[in-house]
């Protein structure tokens, strides 16, 4: 069974995920490369949220506050499995009504903080 990795980033398109062994994950969206994102993504750059892993199943919920731009706040739910080729996550957003399954590939990197 594949294991969650903590020595780099998972990415799909412009979404990046950094996991910590203590149960925190940081989610960031950027048009940068994984090498660029690895230089700044940390618990101090973005608010971490908790994740849970049971067997190969993983889940975490990101809460988006209502913004000044008029976007309605709500949850973005990430749920799926840890696989040899990355994370297979269904991403469901109450904010944008986005609902799709994405494969987040792992990128080993020297990480900040």
Image: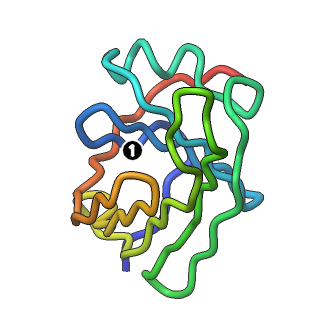
Is 50 on the left-hand or right-hand side of 2?
right
The quarter of the picture where the N terminus appears is: bottom left
Residue 30 in the image: x percent, y percent? 39, 23
Residue 22 in the image: x percent, y percent? 77, 58
Residue at 38 percent across and 16 percent down: it is 35
Corner quadrant of residue 57 = bottom left
Q: Nearer the viewer, residue 15 or 24?
A: 15
Total marks shown come to 1
Colour mapping:
rainbow
Q: Nearer the viewer, residue 35 or 71?
A: 71
Q: Mark 1, residues whose alpha carbon is within 10 Å: few (<14), some, or many (≥20)?
A: many
Can you name the residue that lies furthest to the front here? 70
Corner quadrant of residue 39 = top right
The quarter of the picture where the C terminus appears is: top right
Corner quadrant of residue 9 = top left
Q: Nearer the viewer, residue 62 or 112?
A: 62
Q: Which residue in the structure is indicated by mark 1?
A: 10
In this rendering, the answer to whether 36 lies above or below 107 is above
Residue 95 in the image: x percent, y percent? 45, 54
Residue at 67 percent across and 31 percent down: it is 46
SS category of the residue bearing label 1: strand
Residue at 28 percent across and 66 percent down: it is 88
Residue at 50 percent across and 53 percent down: it is 5
Can you name the residue that lies furthest to the bottom here? 55
Is 113 on the left-hand or right-hand side of 27?
right
In this rendering, the answer to whether 32 lies above or below 18 is above
Residue 54 in the image: x percent, y percent? 56, 86
In this rendering, the answer to whether 87 lies above or below 8 is below
């Amino acid at each position: 069974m594949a294991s969650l990795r903590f020595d780099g980033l998972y990415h799909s398109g412009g979404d990046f995920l950094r996991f910590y062994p203590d149960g925190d994950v940081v989610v960031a969206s950027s048009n940068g490369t994984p090498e660029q994102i690895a230089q700044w993504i940390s618990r101090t750059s973005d608010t971490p949220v908790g994740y849970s892993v049971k067997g190969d199943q993983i889940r975490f919920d990101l809460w988006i506050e209502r913004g000044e731009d008029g976007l309605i706040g709500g949850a973005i739910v990430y749920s799926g499995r840890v696989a040899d080729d990355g994370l297979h996550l269904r991403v469901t957003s109450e904010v944008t009504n986005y609902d799709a399954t994405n494969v987040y590939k792992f990128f080993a990197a020297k990480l900040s903080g």
